[in-house]
Amino acid sequence: MSLKKHILPFSTFILLLSFGNIKAQLLHPGDVNNNGIVNGADALYWATVNGKTGAPRTSPDSNFVPQIIDDLWPDTFANGISHAYADCDGNGIIDDSDLNDFIIKFLYNEHMFSAGTNDPYSLGADGFDPKILLQPSTNSIEEGGNVEIAVSLNSVDGSDIDNIYGLTFIMEFAPRFVDRKFVYNPPSINWIGTDDNISATIFSKIDEGIAEMTIVRKDGSSISGSGDIGSFNIIIEDIVVGLVDRDTLEVEIINIILIDEEFNTKAIAPSTAKIEITKNSTSTNNLLTNQFQVYPNPFEREFIIERPNDVDIKELSLIDPLGKTIPISFDNTTDKKIKIRLQEEAAPGIYFLQIKTEKGVALKTIKIDS
Ligand SMILES: [Ca+2]
Ligand SMILES: [Ca+2]
């Protein structure tokens, strides 16, 4: 379910309400600053009002559906949005359940990974503002490897950074390198807060090549300091589509918010982690790949794939360098030689034949001639 699907009936509802002249406010649980998008910024808004109380909602609903707020709490965020929007479950208390069961759950499932209207994401200047540094555990790794990216917050001159209450930042990367969702690991010395007074998470959508890491303090007090704020692991695909010899995976920070406990923001400079990915010639999958023959290569409309006797093919697909599937037709995959035909015209260039077998996945590089 996409956020759009949530919002569509939601806006229809607003129209009905305004035409009916009824004064009512609608809340989308998890969207704490009420801007139509749930991202790390909402967790920061939540953190600045954790512990506050107000009128509970008459008919709270634990689903992600638009809900009526009968009584807007009188206290507001600086942007005029009532604190009632942070009470995601509508029980009259802003606490961990609102963060964990709504904001974080929604982020995992529906995260939109962009800055919404009025979200105060920005990028500071390198060499002038404090910086989030992404440092990979290795500069070069083979396909199928695991690289840990250490995340630290550092001032320009090495001094402490004052008034840190919450931090969230969005990263971009090429999806074809990455095998699965990122996992957050807390640092060994957690100067920014302990398990009791911080919440730290990383959200990622691998197929969209985007992730957001969010750390909030929850006790209403900021902290000063600098250094390690955790790490996350990236598992590289066993076979990286399009990788001939070596290529570079770049994980680039594209948007940041750092706040104090009053939601005053501070500019923070970004960084980019660069990891060289090399072909793993000894992996099972690459050894398997070498057992298949494809010819002629390059080809125009059709080619033959010849399989080894002891390997059964489960699935065959032709993929372009961007990962898009090209329609093909073929006869019985139990044959020793299988003729593969393009179902429609495809642009000349490099393509990949992905062969799924019970022994692993083989990926043959094949060229379409003009
Ligand atoms: Ca929001
Ligand atoms: Ca609540």
Image (cartoon, rainbow, N blue to C red):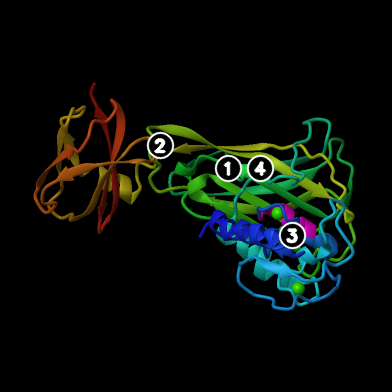
In this rendering, the label closer to the viewer, 1 or 2: 2
Q: Residue at x 70, y 59 (%)?
A: 18
Q: Which mark is residue 32?
A: 3
Q: Which residue is at 65% across, 53% downward?
A: 37
Quick one: label 2, few (<14), some, or many (20+) residues within 10 Å?
few
Q: Is residue 151 left or right of residue 361?
A: right
Give how far apart the Cα atoms at labels 4 and 1 are: 8 Å
Residue 312 screen position, x and y as percent: 17, 56
Q: How far apart, in angstroms, are the residues tagged by discs 4 and 2? A: 27 Å
Q: Pointer 4 and pointer 2: residues touching (CB < 8 Å)?
A: no
Residue 279 can be seen, yes or no = yes
Looking at the figure, which quarter contains the C terminus? top left
What secondary structure is marked by label 3? loop
Q: Which residue is mark 1?
A: 138
Q: Residue furthest front?
A: 20
- Is residue 9 within the magenta segment? no
State how far apart marks 2 and 3 are (Cα).
36 Å
User: Considering only vertical position in the picture, is 209 above or below 191?
Assistant: above
Tell me the residue that label 4 is attached to. Answer: 135
The residue stretch that appears in magenta: 38-45
What distance separates the C-alpha of mark 3 from that of mark 1?
Answer: 38 Å
Residue at screen point 64% across, 65% down:
66
Three-letter amino acid code at the position of disc 4 = Gln
Q: Which amino acid is tagged 3?
A: Val
Main SS of residues in magenta: helix
